[in-house]
Image (cartoon, rainbow, N blue to C red):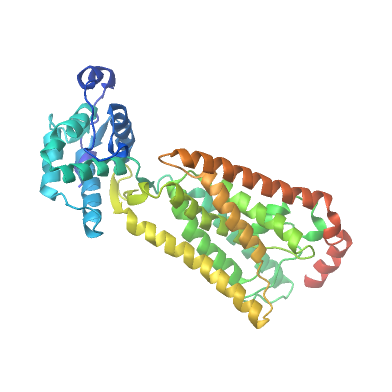
Amino acid sequence: TTQGCASQPLKVVQDSYAVEMVEFTQLNITCDGENEEDKTDLDDWNEIFAQLDPKDGVEDGRICKDAFLEWIDTLNFQATVMLEANQGIPREKIRWLIETADTDDDKHIDRKEFLALVEKYSRELEKIQRNNFLKYMRVAAYADEYRWWPPPFFIILLTIVQIAIYIYHCIYFSNLGVPITWTGPSPFCSVLIYNPGKRYQIWRFFTYSLVHSGMEHILVNIVLQLLVGLALEMSNSWWRVGLVYFLGVTAGSLSFSVISPGAFLAGASGGVYALTCAHLAALLLNWKEDSLIIRQRMRKRKATSPTFGKIVRIGRVLVVGGILGVDVVTAISSSLSGEVNTTSYTAHLSGVVMGMLVGVVMLKNRRVQFWEQWLRVACCALAAVFLLVMIVINIFFSSLFMPSDSEDAECSMNA
């Protein structure tokens, strides 16, 4: 286990890159592949080592030997089970290679030992096995990381605020003698809800996401928000996830005000659907790299454990597809049956679009390809144009919206 690494004393590790360049300059490290993609030179392997270094929980110029073994072994087992490897590597052979590379027997692989492992010791394997072994190291270098510490406080704090506001509204309605039901009441008088008669109060275009109408509304939104938001924030910075959420919510209210000019809007659905489709954006950018997931251990924050990334990847696709599929089926069913449905599918759709576009731009891309750079530029431009058009319509085409003097009558009627 990785516990043996955690107990090792932390020694000062000097960057031996400059010294090792003399020894390894003449090496041409390749994967014995058939094409240019299989070739990896010394600079690439040094970059791979730099990526692997912090994945054992400590960035100290060394890789924990036991953690390294777990990563490679997990990828090897996954590839064998899924019939992607023509010839699996016996676990004993993998352990022997890594044990042999640790020449000073300190339970860690430093840069010099890592380069020797790539160039020298891996040649003990057969050609196909060696190709797989070197491929596994590259995959592990850019593997996704799920860390629970520091905690995903953006999603947690947002959820707490939404629940607190809902409880406040329940107390408010109870004092007025208005019953709290599964589907209502709606807090039309709230200073946070989107009110078409008070569009000049621009905070409402975002704060409506903090307000909910009924127990079903807040329960569904919070469950989905935690389901898709926590995992996304654990693998990305809080501000990246927060920006995706904020722009999804804002795009939802801006487009809703144009399509349904006289209606109120409440609920976090725009942000939730933005986070949902941001998962698709993350998968698109990191499809190959998501073959392995390294998660932080609960008991020891600095220790890590590998997870079968391809299984998690399938799960993410199924969850996202399920959420979107249920929404589409519900919308079609309501339309065909003529049932009154107060759900704002406009806000949902806007969240989906903004989640994909902003997700491509803002979420981590662990290994940037040339085409991905152009994709990011295109998505950034489309998101900016969409928001700009919606803002211009909302500011300069006021005839589309409810007159401001109708707000007081609506509020007093529903209080």
Q: Is residue 8 left or right of residue 147?
A: left
**Quadrant housing the C terminus:** bottom right
User: Which residue is outermost to the right?
Assistant: 405
Count every numbered label the image shows and give the total. Answer: 0
Task: Looking at the picture, tell me which residue is in the foreground, 130 or 324.
Answer: 130
Q: Eyeballing the image, is 206 above or below 163?
A: above
Q: Whole-percent x and y of residue 394?
A: 78, 52
Q: Is residue 54 left or right of residue 103?
A: right
Q: Whole-percent x and y of residue 408?
A: 85, 64
User: Which residue is outermost to the bottom?
Assistant: 337
User: Which residue is outermost to the front?
Assistant: 34
- Residue sitting at x 57%, y 47%: 358
- Residue sitting at x 30%, y 43%: 140
Residue 257 appearing in the image = yes
- Residue sitting at x 18%, y 45%: 128
> Which of the 4 image quarters holds residue 239?
top right
- Residue sitting at x 58%, y 72%: 216
Q: Whole-percent x and y of residue 177?
A: 73, 76
Task: Looking at the picture, tell me which residue is in the foreground, 2 or 175.
Answer: 2
> Which of the 4 image quarters holds residue 308?
bottom left
Task: Looking at the picture, tell me which residue is in the foreground, 261 or 121.
Answer: 121
Residue 3 appearing in the image = no
Q: Whole-percent x and y of residue 320?
A: 48, 62
